[in-house]
Amino acid sequence: MDVLFIGNSFTARNDVPTLIAQLAAARGHALTHRLIQAGGASLRMHWNKGEAQRAIAESRWDRVVLQEQSTLPIKNPRRMHENVRLFDEVIRASGAQTVLYLTWARRHAPETQALITRAYREIGAELGAAVAPVGEAWERVLQTPGHPDLYDADGSHPSLAGSYLAACVLFATLYGENPVGIASDVVGLGPAAVEQLQAAAGL
């Protein structure tokens, strides 16, 4: 599978695409990937820059994963939907499929997860795009006693555990396979944390 990721530091931190590729390899799948990202970037910023559209048109991707700026679905879901529609049109024209990377709420504002989830789910349903419900998996983990800390010190970006959870959800979405039981050698994550995160991300 060839996958293009378009987003910002929520995808780049701890190299989520490579974590997904490692999960895929453990199941016998070959995943090649490219990431186009800029810190704090919205999809509209990527659209205006033009590099992402060129990458979609110039290569044969199977999936294109779109990750919107983390607070835009809360502040302006209509604008976020417009951004996704722009990309979805060129993604479809290229023969690829759109996957939406549904992100998580900030540590200090867990109540905003419902708004983020609704924004992604609504545009996903409208376009028939796959949705990788990473933020929903975060909610499940955060409600579990003794869970690994998913947030980095800033309360926004993912820790290694948070990035691994995102990778597990995206793996499940891309391949339609439950990640539970995949052997992990991610330095910094113990077996108990890996098991818990895989279970939270499972289909």
Image: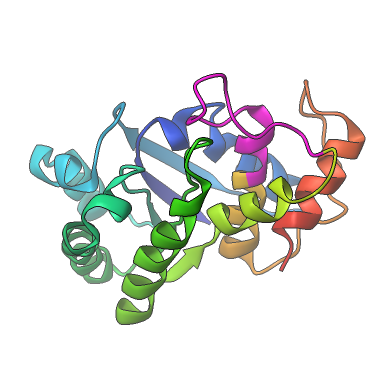
Q: Say if 79 sits above or below 105 in the image.
A: below
Residue 197 in view, yes or no: yes
Please give left or right for residue 109 compared with residue 59 in the image.
right
- Residue drawn at the location 91% of the way across and 35% of the way down: 191
Q: Is residue 155 magenta?
A: yes
Rendered location of residue 179, percent (x, y): 76, 56
- Residue drawn at the location 78% of the way across and 51% of the way down: 198
Q: Say if 155 sits above or below 42 in the image.
A: above
Q: Say if 165 sits above or below 173 in the image.
A: above
Kindly report the secondary structure that dominates the magenta region of the rendered protein. loop
Rendered location of residue 51, percent (x, y): 18, 39
Q: Say if 29 sits above or below 105 in the image.
A: below
> Is 98 or 26 nearer to us in this picture?
98
User: What is the span of residues highlighted in magenta in the rendered image?
Assistant: 147-165
Q: Is residue 161 magenta?
A: yes
- Residue drawn at the location 40% of the way across and 57% of the way down: 116
Q: Quadrant of residue 184?
A: top right
Please give left or right for residue 170 compared with residue 99 in the image.
right
Q: How many marks?
A: 0
Please give left or right for residue 163 compared with residue 154 in the image.
right
Rendered location of residue 63, percent (x, y): 42, 60
- Residue drawn at the location 49% of the way across and 52% of the way down: 111
Rendered location of residue 177, percent (x, y): 71, 66
Q: Which residue sits furthest left?
A: 48
